């Protein structure tokens, strides 16, 4: 009898403990960086060990499904506590609709906020309120295959202006090489050209003016000029055959298979092409060169201005303090120093980049540190205008639209806002 | 007299109300109608009303609901959007190809292999397999086939020393390729409808026509096809409704590209509404799609299908 009572008492103690296990649900986009999922699993395990009764559940979803399902997911009872974010204009939209938790006070009181630079936090703040934290930055640049460039008789390190780049593209084509690899089926790789040209031609001030409709908005002269320069590139027919039916994933494979010289992409391309190359090896860091996106003569933008990501995590409305604690731990210096050392990406928490060893990641880190302004992918564009920019970029490189019509489409979308 | 007639009538048959109760029809309705009504209301009627309501708003899909009323603006933008007009036009092309190409091929195949022989059973299976395949799988398979770098076409171009071909990357060829896959995927479905209908035609009629000196072509044209009219009516209905809903073949194959030239109304709705987080605009496209489908369904049922039932 006494034994039964003991068992019952033990069960009474255990059951609430099990029932009260706190779940932290994390929704991430898929990653193909080798070893990153194992790294995240280690982070989960370490956090759970230091927070008994906590169960961290990380789910992965491909980019497109993630974007489409997120609005519905955030309204469901099974919404994630933390979810991946490319930051940008969407954060403001999500904050205005009340689906994010304001973690300003909590993150400051726990010392978590102090682990991140103001620039990084700005990407996850709206009207001074912090809704998430950044994890890594990326820098879009022109990567090239050194061997093929040599064979074509061009030296990409000499590219200083857009005209230089176009000259080298032309020379490479004349030499029988495919000058540029692009995954235009996914549209955003083509958008990178449009956005970087706008970065150089329109400039930060011009971006801000267009957003409020000044100087003709997105149909203004500088935006039309951006389209004209992209049209010039498209007219050279520099892309691989079938580029309009090439996904980004396939373009990585083509680059790794050495099917073309240049690819405009973030530094994540370097490890990714090794994972997806047909021979399973791709190119080594030494076989790949990189130059910043060139200046455009007469443009209003600064050649040191960078363009890329400030990816991280947002906290959904109603998420617990434990979820925020996990986020702080995950994107904090301890975990991120290891992520940087393992070469997954460029961590942004203060001090975490110290052990970045990968040469190309280091190159990107240097560009970001000397940047005169970092434009986060679509930060200066609201999501719907950004969507039009995707179409316009593909149509300009393929000659399906004119610079004037493309700019007018973007402005039309702005006026609808 | 009137009263007398009424009482006689009452004696002859129980009141309607009592009859319904007694023969169990009321109980059947009470048992089976509520679940169906509930499901229809929850998953068809309410989303329809909700979609129509959202179509008057500018809304990203985030938050508890839309607040920014824009009236008919979403419909005006749609009417002036060249991609929408192209998608609408493409949908009409899908309908036309389904009715004028898919169904005739299905019928021709059915006429060739409707008789019960071992070889015919084999061919029926072969032609029906594409229909069984999931649409997404079909799209992926064909996108691999047409991949000029790593796909089947690249193997052929390497063998024969041809230049690489990328039809899905070509604004002129992408839609014809999509239509070819569309016909390949669904003709087997129509073929099976016609095979079932052909097998139900009495052999005596065909034999009689043959004795009267009809050639095989005349038998097909004057005996079998006229008797297939009810099956054709059903087949056309499914072909049109299926074409109006075409979506999951397009996404893996072309994603509506290149340059948005291969969208159907549904893939346009998905890309320009859901992916771009313009739920209000997407709902407006949904309303147009619903109206087109509804008008077709009602018109078709009240004309073609009705005349078939009356006959």
Image (spheres, rainbow, N blue to C red):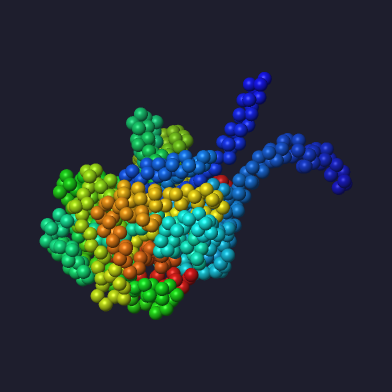
In front: A290, or A298? Answer: A290
User: What residue sits 47% from the left and 66% below the top?
Assistant: B78
The single residue placed furthest to the top in the displayed view is A1
Q: Is residue A330 above or below residue A155?
A: above
Question: Is residue A9 shown left or right of residue B153?
Answer: right
Can residue A77 be seen here? yes
User: What residue sits 58% from the left and 36% below the top?
Assistant: A17
Can residue A400 be seen here? no
In front: A324, or A90? Answer: A324
Q: Residue B160: where, in percent of width, then height?
A: 16, 46
User: What residue sits 51% from the left and 46% below the top?
Assistant: A24
- Identify the image quadrant of residue A294: bottom left
Number of marks in picture: 0
Q: Residue A379: where, in percent of width, then height?
A: 41, 65
Question: Is residue A338 shown left or right of residue B203?
Answer: left
In front: B95, or B144? Answer: B144
User: What residue sits 28% from the left and 46% below the top?
Assistant: A275
Q: Is residue A180 above or below residue B98?
A: below
Q: Residue B42: where, in percent of width, then height?
A: 60, 49
Q: Residue B232: where, in percent of width, then height?
A: 46, 46
In front: A38, or B202? Answer: A38
């Amino acid at each position: 009898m006494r034994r039964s009572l003991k068992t019952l008492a033990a069960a009474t103690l255990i059951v609430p403990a099990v029932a009260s296990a706190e779940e932290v649900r994390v929704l991430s986009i898929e990653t193909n960086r080798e070893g990153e999922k194992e790294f995240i699993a280690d982070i989960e395990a370490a956090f759970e060990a230091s927070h008994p009764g906590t169960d961290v559940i990380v789910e992965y979803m491909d980019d497109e499904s993630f974007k489409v399902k997120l609005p519905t997911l955030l309204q469901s009872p099974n919404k994630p506590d933390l979810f991946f974010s490319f930051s940008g204009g969407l954060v403001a939209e999500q904050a205005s609709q009340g689906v994010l938790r304001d973690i300003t006070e909590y993150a400051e009181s726990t010392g978590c906020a102090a682990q991140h630079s103001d620039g990084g936090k700005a990407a996850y703040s709206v009207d001074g309120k912090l809704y998430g934290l950044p994890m890594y930055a990326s820098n879009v640049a022109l990567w090239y295959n050194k061997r093929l460039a040599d064979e074509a008789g061009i030296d990409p390190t000499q590219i200083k202006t857009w005209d230089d780049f176009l000259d080298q593209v032309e020379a490479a084509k004349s030499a029988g090489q495919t000058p540029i690899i692009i995954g235009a089926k996914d549209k955003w790789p083509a958008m990178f050209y449009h956005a970087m040209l706008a970065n150089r031609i329109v400039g930060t001030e011009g971006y801000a003016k267009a957003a409020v409709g000044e100087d003709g908005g997105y149909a203004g002269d500088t935006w039309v000029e951006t389209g004209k320069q992209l049209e010039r590139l498209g007219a050279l027919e520099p892309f691989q055959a079938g580029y309009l039916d090439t996904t980004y994933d396939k373009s990585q494979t083509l680059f790794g298979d050495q099917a073309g010289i240049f690819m405009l992409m973030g530094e994540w391309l370097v490890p990714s092409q090794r994972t997806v190359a047909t021979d399973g090896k791709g190119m080594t860091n030494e076989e790949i060169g990189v130059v910043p996106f060139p200046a455009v003569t007469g443009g209003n933008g600064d050649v040191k201005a960078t363009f890329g990501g400030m990816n991280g995590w947002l906290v959904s409305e109603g998420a617990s303090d434990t979820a925020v604690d996990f986020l702080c731990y995950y994107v904090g210096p301890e975990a991120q120093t290891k992520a940087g050392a393992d070469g997954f990406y460029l961590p942004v928490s203060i001090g975490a980049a110290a052990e970045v060893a990968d040469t190309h990641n280091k190159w990107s880190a240097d560009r970001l540190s000397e940047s005169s302004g970092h434009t986060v992918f679509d930060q200066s564009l609201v999501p719907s205008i950004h969507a039009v920019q995707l179409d316009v970029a593909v149509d300009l490189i393929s000659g399906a639209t004119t610079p004037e019509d493309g700019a007018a489409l973007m402005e039309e979308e702005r006026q609808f806002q | 007299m009137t009263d007398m007639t009424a009482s006689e009538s009452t004696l002859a048959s129980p009141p309607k109300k009592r009859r319904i109760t007694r023969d169990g029809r009321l109980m059947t309705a009470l048992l089976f109608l509520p679940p169906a009504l509930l499901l229809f209301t929850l998953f068809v009627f309410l989303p329809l009303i909700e979609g129509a309501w959202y179509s008057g708003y500018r809304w990203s899909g985030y938050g508890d609901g839309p607040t920014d009323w824009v009236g008919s603006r979403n419909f005006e933008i749609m009417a002036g959007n060249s991609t929408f007009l192209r998608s609408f036009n493409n949908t009409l092309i899908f309908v036309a190809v389904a009715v004028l190409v898919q169904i005739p091929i299905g019928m021709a195949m059915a006429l060739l292999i409707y008789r019960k022989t071992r070889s015919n059973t084999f061919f029926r299976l072969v032609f029906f397999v594409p229909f069984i395949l999931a649409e997404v799988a079909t799209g992926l398979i064909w996108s691999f086939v047409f991949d000029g770098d790593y796909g089947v076409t690249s193997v052929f171009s390497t063998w024969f020393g041809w230049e690489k071909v990328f039809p899905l990357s070509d604004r002129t060829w992408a839609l014809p390729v999509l239509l070819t896959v569309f016909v390949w995927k669904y003709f087997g479905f129509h073929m099976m409808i016609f095979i079932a209908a052909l097998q139900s035609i009495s052999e005596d009629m065909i034999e009689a026509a043959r004795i009267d000196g009809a050639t095989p072509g005349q038998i097909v044209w004057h005996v079998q096809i006229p008797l297939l009219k009810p099956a054709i009516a059903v087949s056309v209905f499914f072909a049109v409704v299926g074409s109006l809903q075409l979506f999951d073949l397009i996404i893996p194959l072309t994603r509506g590209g290149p340059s948005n030239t291969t969208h159907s109304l549904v893939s346009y709705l998905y890309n320009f509404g859901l992916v771009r987080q313009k739920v209000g605009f997407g709902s407006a496209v949904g309303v147009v799609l619903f109206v087109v489908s509804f008008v077709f369904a009602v018109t078709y049922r009240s004309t073609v299908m009705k005349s078939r039932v009356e006959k």
